[in-house]
Image: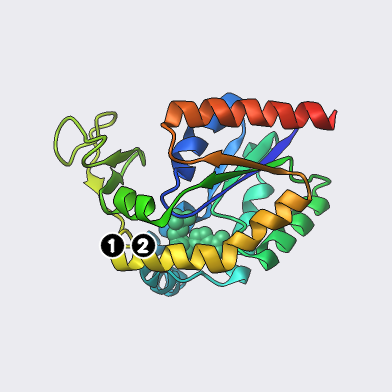
Amino acid sequence: MVKDLIILGAPGAGKGTLSADLCPLLKIKHISTGDLLREVVESGSALGQEIGGYIKTGALVPDEVIGRMIKEQLNTAECRNGVLLDGFPRTPPQAEMLENILADLQRRITAVFFLNIEQEQVVNRLIHRVSCRKCGKPYHLINLPPKKSGICDDCGGDLIQREDDREETIRKRFATFLEKTQPLIDFYDRKKLLLPINAGNNPQETLRIALADLEALLNNIK
Ligand code: AMP
C-alpha cells in the first residue's frame, strides 16, 4: 500500500529526527521543503536569493514556489511507494494544493503525525542545535554534543548552525506556526487522519509511538 504521510509540528519539535527514523522503516521518501529550499538558496541563483530573504526572517516562501517543488518531487520514481512530507503543507491553501496534486496521481493522504511542543522547549532546543553540513545529522550542543567539537560523529563533516536558529527568528517562526499551520491540525483531525504525539519524549519513544499509532489507524481503515 502506498503511504503518503505528513508530519506537522512547530520548528524544533523533532520532525526531521522522526522522519529520518521512520522513512527507512516504511520504505518511503522523506521530503523536507525546508531542506529543498535551503539547497536552492545554496545554489546562489536569483530564485535562491529571493527564497533566502524569506527564510532569514522566518516568513513563509510563496505557495507557487512550494507547489511547483512538491509536484516535481511527487512525480519522481523515488516517491512511488509513498512520502513523508515534512514542512509541507504549512497553510490551509497548501493543504488544498496537496490534495489536488495527490488526486491527480490517484493518491490521498494516509495519516498526519502532529508533534506537539511548547514554545520555551523549542527555543531551548534550537538555539543549541547544529547539524552536519554533509549528512544533515542533528546535534544538541548540551544534551547531545558531538564527540569532537564542530565535527560530525558519523561522517566527519563540519557542523553548522542554521542562520534562522537565532532566538528572535525562532520566536517569529513559532508565531508563524501558530497563526498559519495550527488550523491544519483541526482540518486533519476532522478528517480522522491526525495522530498527535507528545514531542517531549526521546526519539526512540517517539518512533515507537508513531509506528504503533499508524498501525492502529491503518487497521481501523481496513
Ligand atoms: P523548516 O526547515 O521546515 O523549519 O523551514 C525553514 C524555512 O523554510 C521556513 O521558516 C520558511 O521560510 C521556509 N519553508 C519551508 N517549508 C515551507 C512551506 N511549506 N511553505 C512556505 N515556506 C516554507
* Res 93 → quadrant: bottom right
Q: Secondary structure at mark 1?
A: loop
Instruction: Mark 2: give few (<14), some (14-19) or many (20+) Cα within 10 Å.
Output: many
Residue 166 falls left or right of residue 64 = left
- Residue type at mark 1: give it: Arg
| Marks 1 & 2, CB-CB < 8 Å contact | yes
Picture coordinates of residue 51, whole percent (x, y)? 45, 70
Spot the residue most to the left. Answer: 149
- Residue type at mark 2: give it: Ile
| Residue placed under numbered mark 1 in the picture | 166
Q: Secondary structure at mark 2?
A: helix
Instruction: Mark 1: give few (<14), some (14-19) or many (20+) Cα within 10 Å.
Output: some
Would you place residue 16 above or below residue 173 in this image?
A: above
Residue 64 shows which numbered tag? Answer: none
Picture coordinates of residue 86, whole percent (x, y)? 55, 48
Asked if residue 77 shows in the view, the reply is: no
Residue 170 shows which numbered tag? Answer: 2
Would you place residue 41 above or below residue 150 in this image?
A: below
Residue occupying the point 62% across, 50% down: 73
Asked if residue 141 shows in the view, the reply is: yes
Residue 33 falls left or right of residue 81 = left
**Count of residue discs:** 2
State the CA–CA distance, disc 1 to disc 2.
6 Å
Quarter placement of the C terminus: top right
* Pick the front one: 168 or 25: 168
Residue occupying the point 53% across, 64% down: 178
Picture coordinates of residue 169, whole percent (x, y)? 35, 67
Residue occupying the point 48% across, 54% down: 10
* Pick the front one: 108 or 214: 214
Quarter placement of the N terminus: top right
